[in-house]
Image: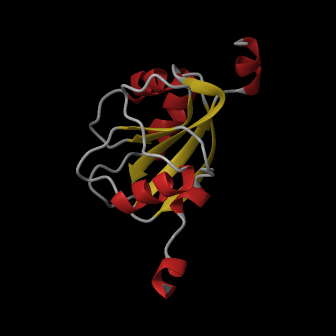
Amino acid sequence: MVAAADAPNYAQRLGIQKDQVVQELGWDEDTDDDIRADIEEACGSELLDEDADEVIDVVLLWWRDGDGDLVDRLMDAITPLAEDGVIWVITPKTGKPGHVLPAEIAESAPTAGLMQTSSANLGDWIATRLVQPKSKAAGRR
């Protein structure tokens, strides 16, 4: 039981809370199952896939170099996102296969209508938090 107490709390680092609706995009064999399990435990349900019809509170977007056009993927992720929803772009850390330059996220976010606010260390992955600007969200009511 001591090992569990020492385990990283990935969901807490990402601000995931009970009863939030969390959608996962970009899953592949290289995604970290410990991160996924911790998030499912925190929100209290399984992660939804891209076919979900619900309003989404948090999007986990696993993204690697070579996955395509990040702006297009972010635009798709925004569609079901709640006004105060968050998109976490999760990329491999520097030196890991599929590493994405931070500039790619920094340049893609505003093009997709998002603002970069913070990042979180998730072991071999780094998560970048993107949100919709408040003025834009207010205009969508």
Q: How is this picture coloured? A: secondary structure
Residue 43 on image: x %, y %: 55, 49
Please determine whether, in this image, residue 21 is positioned above or below residue 52: below
Residue at point 73% right, 12% down? Answer: 141
Residue 39 on image: x %, y %: 49, 54
Please determine whether, in this image, residue 57 is positioned above or below residue 94: above
Numbered label tally: 0
Residue at point 60% right, 44% down? Answer: 19
Residue extending furthest toward the bottom: 2
Nearest to the observer: residue 10 or residue 1: 1
Q: Is residue 52 left or right of residue 116?
A: left
Residue at point 40% right, 49% down? Answer: 91
Residue 23 on image: x %, y %: 46, 37
Residue 83 falls in image quadrant: top right
Q: Is residue 40 left or right of residue 110?
A: left
Residue extending furthest toward the left: 29
Nearest to the observer: residue 139 or residue 18: 18
Residue 130 falls in image quadrant: top right
Residue 25 on image: x %, y %: 38, 36
Q: Is residue 138 left or right of residue 105?
A: right
Residue at point 41% right, 36% down? Answer: 48
